[in-house]
């Protein structure tokens, strides 16, 4: 099992450019999450999905969109990147919510200049 | 609203010394509590979790944590640390089924173990 994988690992964007981050999991998990990690702020939830075809907003959704067309994939899109979106992005998945462990991918380091 | 506060942003300690990383949370409802560890340039992995029952929880790599409901704390401890424990540690709570079981994280504590 590969667990949770993220593509790409690093990316540099210019302000206004768009990109899509891909998260894939091979554990047949229903729940998937996108977090961003910023120094001194821990991880904050951007969007999440409770199953194929469903998505919902987290704490900091502005400037991001997501899609979950297949159960194993969760895509995070930036339509018009801004310097404030410079961060490390982590995807996670979980079999069930609340008491179950979330499994994290290795992260994508994004820099917006 | 729920929140998590990790009281120390950095904890330097010598090898084989004991360590305690402090975590307090605020919530008006029952929560599930977690500690995750992040080694350099890696994702997070679960150290331990408290769901219910015994307030002392044992995790991987010799870590343990104690849930204290009256003080709303969930401090992480290890009696003797190794160089390999150098990492960032995150305390988190899981709340509200209606929010997808999202995790609310503390700010993180950088544990630096020196020889």
Image (tube, rainbow, N blue to C red):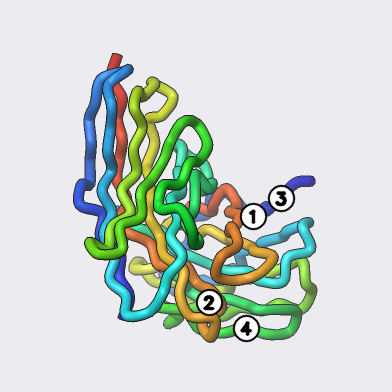
User: Going from the N terminus, do you reach mark 4 or mark 1 first?
Assistant: 1
The residue under the point 44% across, 24% down is B84
Q: How far apart are marks 4 and 2 (CA)?
A: 7 Å
Q: How far apart are marks 3 and 2 (CA)?
A: 20 Å
**Disc ID at residue A47:** 2
Helix, strand or loop at disc 3?
Answer: loop
Q: In which quarter of the image is residue B82?
A: top left
Chain hosting mark 1: A
Q: Distance between the residues labelled 1 and 3?
A: 10 Å
* Residue B77 drawn at (x, y percent): 34, 38
Q: Do labels 4 and 2 share a chain?
A: yes
**How many other residues sit within 10 Å of disc 4, few (<14), some (14-19) or many (≥20)?**
many
> In the image shown, does B5 or A7 lie closer to the viewer?
B5
Residue at 22%, 47% (x, y): give it: B9
Provide the residue designation for mark 3.
A3
Disc nearer the start of the sequence (3/2): 3
Query: How crowded is the residue under tag 1: few (<14 C-alpha within 10 Å), some, or many (20+)?
Result: many
Say yes or no: labels 3 and 4 on the same chain: yes
Q: Which is closer to the viewer, label 4 or label 1? A: 4
Label located before the other in sequence (3 or 4): 3
Q: Which of marks 1 and 2 is nearer the N terminus?
A: 1
On-image quarter of the N terminus of chain B: bottom left
Which residue is pictured at 56% across the width and 84% down the height?
A56
Label 4 sits on residue: A55
Determine if residue B16 is in view. yes
Name the N-terminal-most of marks 4 and 2. Answer: 2
Secondary structure of residue under mark 2: strand
Label ID, residue A6: 1
Q: On what subunit does the disc labeled 2 rest?
A: A
Residue at figure coordinates x 43%, y 36% from the top left: B63
Give neighbour class at mark 3: few <14, some 14-19, many 20+ (Cα, 10 Å): some
Whether residue B14 is situated above or below residue B2 in the rendered picture: above
């Amino acid at each position: 099992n590969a667990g949770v994988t993220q593509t790409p690992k690093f990316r540099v964007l210019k302000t206004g450019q768009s990109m899509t981050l891909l998260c894939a999991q091979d554990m047949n998990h229903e729940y998937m999450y996108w977090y961003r990690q910023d120094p001194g702020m821990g991880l904050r939830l951007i969007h999440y999905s409770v199953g194929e075809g469903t998505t919902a907003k987290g704490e900091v959704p502005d400037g991001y969109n997501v899609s979950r067309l297949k159960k194993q994939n969760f895509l995070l899109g930036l339509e018009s990147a801004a310097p404030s979106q410079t961060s490390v992005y982590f995807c996670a998945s979980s079999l069930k919510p609340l008491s179950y462990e979330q499994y994290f991918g290795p992260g994508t380091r994004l820099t917006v200049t | 609203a729920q929140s998590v506060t990790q009281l120390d942003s950095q904890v330097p300690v010598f090898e084989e010394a004991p360590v305690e990383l402090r975590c307090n949370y605020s919530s008006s409802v029952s929560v599930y509590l977690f500690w995750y560890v992040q080694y350099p340039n890696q994702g997070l992995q679960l150290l331990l979790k408290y769901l219910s029952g015994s307030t002392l929880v044992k995790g991987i790599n010799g870590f343990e944590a104690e849930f204290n409901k009256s003080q709303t704390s969930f401090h992480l401890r290890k009696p003797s640390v190794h160089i390999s424990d150098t990492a960032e540690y995150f305390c988190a709570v899981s709340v509200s089924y209606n929010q997808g079981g999202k995790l609310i994280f503390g700010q993180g504590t950088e544990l630096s173990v020196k020889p």
